[in-house]
Image (spheres, rainbow, N blue to C red):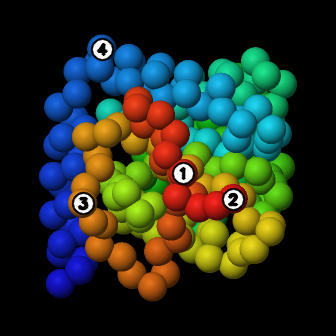
Amino acid sequence: MMLNEKKQLRTLLRKKRSALSRGEIHSHSHSAMTHFVHSDIFLKNQHFACYLSANHEIETQLFIEHVFQYKKKCYLPRLEQDHMVFAHYTLGDSLTSNQFNILEPTATQHRDAKELDVILAPLVGFDSKGHRLGMGGGFYDRTLENVKGQSKPMIIGLAFECQRIDAVPTEAWDIPLDAILTENGLETFSTR
């Protein structure tokens, strides 16, 4: 039952996100980025994993450019079988499409998730308790399932407010967010 419920929620929330105009996406993305680069989380950390946006997601290129502008390190996810690694990325590095037609670095140098300070994670939906409705592949959950305690990076979901729902159906293996970043600001869920 839960898989069907999640599938229906993903369809509904993708439609909501797709209804945003290009101008709204750009404006909301810029607002979210401005909130983030003025936060202590951004200013006090050095190693950031991000992703390359697609399908009406927040424009992550804005975040990536600021990571470089502030002389911080950027890593992008690269799929390896059933999990991800975070490959070091510099503007202009070679990219290739993976099996989901998402661009990822071709670089082999990567950093373990536990060595990252912050992971900016894509999502389809979220709730006010920090539960994340992902894309459905489970890659973030599998990659982060063994990273716990003090070595765990801060996981921040990137989304538009229209992707907020009352309650995300959760499974035992779902990794919660530490914070969510939208056009309205940065909302934290954990005490980290």
Is tag 2's residue or tag 3's residue first in the polypeptide sequence?
3
Is tag 4's residue or tag 3's residue first in the polypeptide sequence?
4
Residue nearest the observer in this picture, 6 or 27: 27
Please tell me how crowded label 4 is: few (under 14), some (14-19), or many (20+) other residues with Cα within 10 Å.
Answer: few
Residue at point 22%, 27% (across, down): 20
131 in relation to 116, above or below: below
Q: Secondary structure at mark 1?
A: strand
Per the model, the C-alpha gap separating discs 2 and 4 is 34 Å
Q: Is residue 126 left or right of residue 162?
A: right
Q: Where is residue 14 shown, x and y percent of the image?
A: 23, 46
Residue at point 57%, 74% (across, down): 142
Residue that carries the numbered disc 3 in the rendered image:
166
Please tell me how crowded label 1 is: few (under 14), some (14-19), or many (20+) other residues with Cα within 10 Å.
Answer: some
Q: Is residue 71 left or right of residue 132?
A: right
What mark, if any, has residue 188 been given in the picture? 1
Q: Quadrant of residue 9 in the image? A: bottom left
Per the model, the C-alpha gap separating discs 2 and 3 is 24 Å
Look at label 1 and name its amino acid.
Thr
Residue that carries the numbered disc 4 in the rendered image:
23
Please tell me how crowded label 2 is: few (under 14), some (14-19), or many (20+) other residues with Cα within 10 Å.
Answer: few
What mark, if any, has residue 192 been given in the picture? 2
